[in-house]
Amino acid sequence: MIGLLDAAKIAGGIALGALIATPAAHYLGKREGRQEAAVAALEQSVKALRERSATDDEISRSDLAGLCRHLGLLRDDERECLRRLAEASAKP
C-alpha cells in the first residue's frame, strides 16, 4: 500500500505540476486568442477590399449619367452633377 509519506509526495508532485502547467496553459491560450483575433481582422480586411473592388468596378463601368443617378440627386442637381463631371473629364 501507499504510505502517508508517499501520498504526500504524490500530492506535492501534482501540485507542483499544476503550478508549472497553469501559467504555460494561460500563455498558450492567450496567444491562441490573439492569433484568432488577428485572423478575424484579416478576413474582415479582405472582405472590405473585395467589396470596394466590386464597387470600383461598378463605378468604372458606369457612364456619367449613371453615376449622378446613383447619388440619388434631384433632377436639377443631377444635371449640375453631369455638367461638372463632363467638365472635369474634359480637362487633361
Image (cartoon, rainbow, N blue to C red):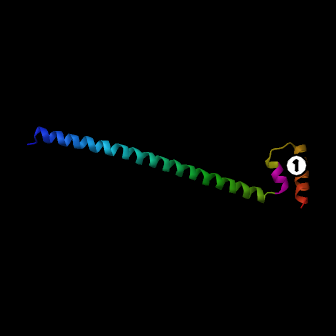
In the rendered image, which quarter contains the N terminus? top left
Residue 81 location, x and y as percent? 87, 49
Q: How many marks?
A: 1
Q: Seen in the image, is 13 located left or right of residue 56? A: left
* Residue shown at 90% from the left, 47% from the top: 80
Q: Which residues are magenta?
A: 63-68
Reply above or below: 10 against 51. above
User: In the image, is residue 11 above or below residue 86?
Assistant: above
- The structure residue drawn at horizontal position 77% and vertical position 59%, both measured from the top left corner, is 60
Q: Amino acid at mark 1?
A: Cys
Given the current orientation, which residue lies at the most extreme left position?
Answer: 1
For the residue pair 42 and 29, the one nearer the viewer reads as 29
Looking at this view, is 33 or 3 the one in front?
A: 3
Q: Which residue is mark 1?
A: 81
Looking at the picture, tell me which residue is in the foreground, 87 or 79: 87
The C terminus lies in quadrant: bottom right
Side of 14 relative to 48 (left or right) = left
Q: In x, y percent, where is residue 12?
A: 22, 40
Q: 10 Å neighbourhood of mark 1: few (<14), some, or many (≥20)? A: some
What secondary structure is found at the residue carrying circle 1? helix
The secondary structure that most of the magenta stretch takes on is helix
Q: Residue at x 26, y 40 (%)?
A: 15
Left or right of 55 in this view: 78: right
Residue 20 versus residue 55 in the image, above or below: above
Residue at the spot 86% in from the left edge and 42% down from the top edge = 74
Residue 75 within the magenta-colored segment of the rendering: no
Horizontally, residue 32 falls left or right of residue 7, namely right
Q: Position of residue 59 (x, y in %)?
A: 76, 55
